[in-house]
Structure formats: structure tokens, C-alpha cells
Image (cartoon, rainbow, N blue to C red):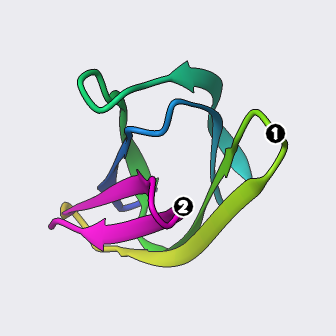
Amino acid sequence: VKTPHGRLSLIFESRIDEGKLSILVDGNSMVGESYTASSSAPFRWTKDMKAAVGQHYVKVTVTTPNGKSYEQGWNVMIQRRALSIWKIQMDRFPKKIRIKRIQ
């Protein structure tokens, strides 16, 4: 029996100088990497994945070099044969993570 699937696409962008990005989907690590960015050369990370139909939990953490962490989590509902795209952005002033559904 085939499990019905949809697709989940995550896009992370930051203009913050440095940080470490961690993204978990249902507790499974999608990325854990350090980055360097600037206003003229932003950091961008994308991931497109197959996901089982139903609800999933996405958690994003950005840790700055001084050890301060910014975290945001949300539920995503995946529909059969549908694509769910989310843009995640780390803002500089004030420092916070913004989440926006694109599709």
C-alpha cells in the first residue's frame, strides 16, 4: 500500500552577519550549518522534500555568535499531491524570525 504524499519546500534567508541555522521537521534534522551573510550577499538555504499527507511540525533555530538563540515553530498541513512552500527570514532589526506561507 502506497502512502499518499505531498511536497514541503522551505526557503531560509538571512542578512544577519553570522549565525548557525538549525531546521527540524517532525524532530528530524534538515540542516545544521553555520553561515555568513551581509546585506549585499544574503545567505539562502532551500530544501524541497516529499512529506506524508497530514500535519507536520517545523522548528527553526538561529543562533548568533554570542550564543543568543531565536526560535520559531509552526504546524504545516500537507495535502495529497500538493506543494506547501514556506519562506523563513531572519530579520536584523529587531532580530527575529519571520515565517510566511508562499503557497
Count all numbered tags in the image, as a single digit.
2
Residue bearing mark 2:
95
Write down the quadrant of residue 80 in the picture.
bottom left
Amino acid carrying mark 2 in the image = Lys
Q: Main secondary structure of the magenta part?
A: strand
Based on the picture, tell me whether residue 1 belongs to the magenta stretch: no
Q: Dot 1 corresponds to which residue?
A: 66
In x, y percent, where is residue 15?
38, 38
Task: State the image quarter where residue 38 is shown.
Answer: top left
Q: Which residues are magenta?
A: 83-103
Q: CA distance from mark 1 to mark 2?
A: 13 Å
Q: Earlier in the sequence, mark 1 or mark 2?
A: 1
**Residue 1, placed above or below residue 98:** above
Instruction: Identify the residue at image location x=67%, y=60%.
Output: 70
Q: Tell me what residue is drawn at x 75 percent, y 55 percent.
A: 69
**Residue 90 shown in magenta:** yes
Q: Quadrant of residue 87?
A: bottom left
Residue 44 vs residue 82: left or right? right
Q: What x and y, as percent, mark residue 94?
A: 49, 67
What kind of element bears circle 2?
A: loop
Q: Residue at x 84, y 43 (%)?
A: 67
